[in-house]
Image: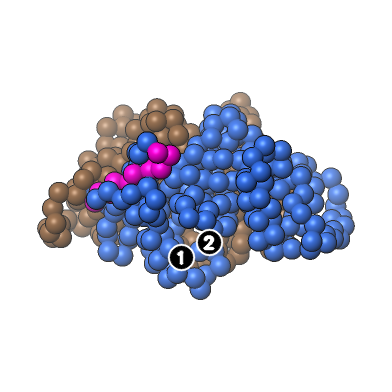
Chain colours: A blue, B brown
Amino acid sequence: MAASAAAAAPWKQLLLNALDSNANFKHSTYFQLATIGSNGRPANRTVVFRGFEDGSNKIHINTDCRTCKIEEIKRFPFAEICWYFTESWEQFRINGTVDIIDGSNPDPMKLVQREKAWFGSSLRSRLQYLGPTPGLPCISEEPSQELSLDPSTGPVGAFCLLVVDPDQVDYLNLKSNERLSFTSKDNGDGGKCWISKKINP
Amino acid sequence: MAASAAAAAPWKQLLLNALDSNANFKHSTYFQLATIGSNGRPANRTVVFRGFEDGSNKIHINTDCRTCKIEEIKRFPFAEICWYFTESWEQFRINGTVDIIDGSNPDPMKLVQREKAWFGSSLRSRLQYLGPTPGLPCISEEPSQELSLDPSTGPVGAFCLLVVDPDQVDYLNLKSNERLSFTSKDNGDGGKCWISKKINP
């Protein structure tokens, strides 16, 4: 089965269905993002799904520019998402390239996306980007001082949008014991053509 | 803080506590294992925790020798586990080396471990290793034939035990907003000496 580039990728509806059937659980929007660490070893952490890019199959993640994954992705811009849905027993493994959109991005359209992502996140989430550098030694025994942020303030320097552009997806349903492999090819006009096949679980 | 090699690693009790406080949920024993794929890109999938090796900090995972991760680990024997506990909001990122114990392993002690892992898993789990090769195209539209296995039959060829030997652990508690980094050094007598420090979340 092949789908046109303009259309949603054939795995996207499966993912939207899974999000829908697991919507009672906050953690259903959490997944694990694997990258290659700066020492060449695998790195893996939980991040939050922030939605699809409008009219596309690209996946948005908010992160702090000061975390290790930014340097890792700059060196090697590939990642695999592993997204397991605990209620429906479905797993999506999504492999793709990652684009980093920080405040220095030269593309005005991308800066608009970053701003949208910023205002789309809660005030509490935004405050994290004002805190001390993640991963550095914690120097104070005191709870960190109360930070405050005006809700109209735009994205701060540490705020970064990651955009994962999938080119391979492996779907596994542990209830039906079915597995599908989705692979893509560039179709020549900047889009992708997706092929799916049923494989052994 | 430093702990001796013979003692449990300082992060191990945190992990046992997390398993205990999330024990109501079957998925609390599932985690994501990231490796380097054979194309050099990150690979990431959900696997099941099968316990610690007796008297050690090593983590056991059962898998099928015919899955891609075996070839991946043979080429590059490093992995990062990302283990998120959905009830207690705790995350463990466990980086280490991976040992593959299949039926051809020359070490009799390791073969005993593999056999123990086999008999420690359910009959239903064991049956999976008799099924068609995971990841290959599904050639039959029929449901696979009923497989049967004598409960006293030892490990079949496709059954493989993975042993992850952690050398770095990152612990994050999203309720208390605390994060700890645990790193190890070989202590010269085959054991490891662990150092922990508090870092910014």
- Asked whether, in this view, residue A71 is left or right of residue B99, the answer is right
Residue occupying image coordinates x 71% and y 38% = A104
Residue occupying image coordinates x 66% and y 50% = A112
For numbered disc 2, what is the local secondary structure? helix
Which residue, given by chain and number where applicable, does mark 2 sit on?
A: A29
- Is tag 1's residue or tag 2's residue first in the polypeptide sequence? 1
Q: Residue A67, how many percent across, how many down?
A: 68, 42
Host chain of mark 1 = A
Which residue, given by chain and number where applicable, does mark 1 sit on?
A: A19
In the rendered structure, does residue A193 fall within the stretch colored magenta? Answer: yes
Question: In this orientation, does residue B32 appear?
Answer: no
Image height check: is B171 above or below B193?
below
To the question of a shared chain for discs 1 and 2, the answer is yes
CB-based contact (under 8 Å), mark 1 and mark 2: yes
Host chain of mark 2 = A
The amino acid at mark 2 is: Thr
Image height check: is A112 above or below A96?
below
> What is the magenta range?
A189-198
Give residue A154's quadrant in the image. bottom right
Number of numbered discs visible in the structure rendering: 2
Badge 2: residue crowd in 10 Å (few <14, some 14–19, many ≥20): some
The amino acid at mark 1 is: Leu
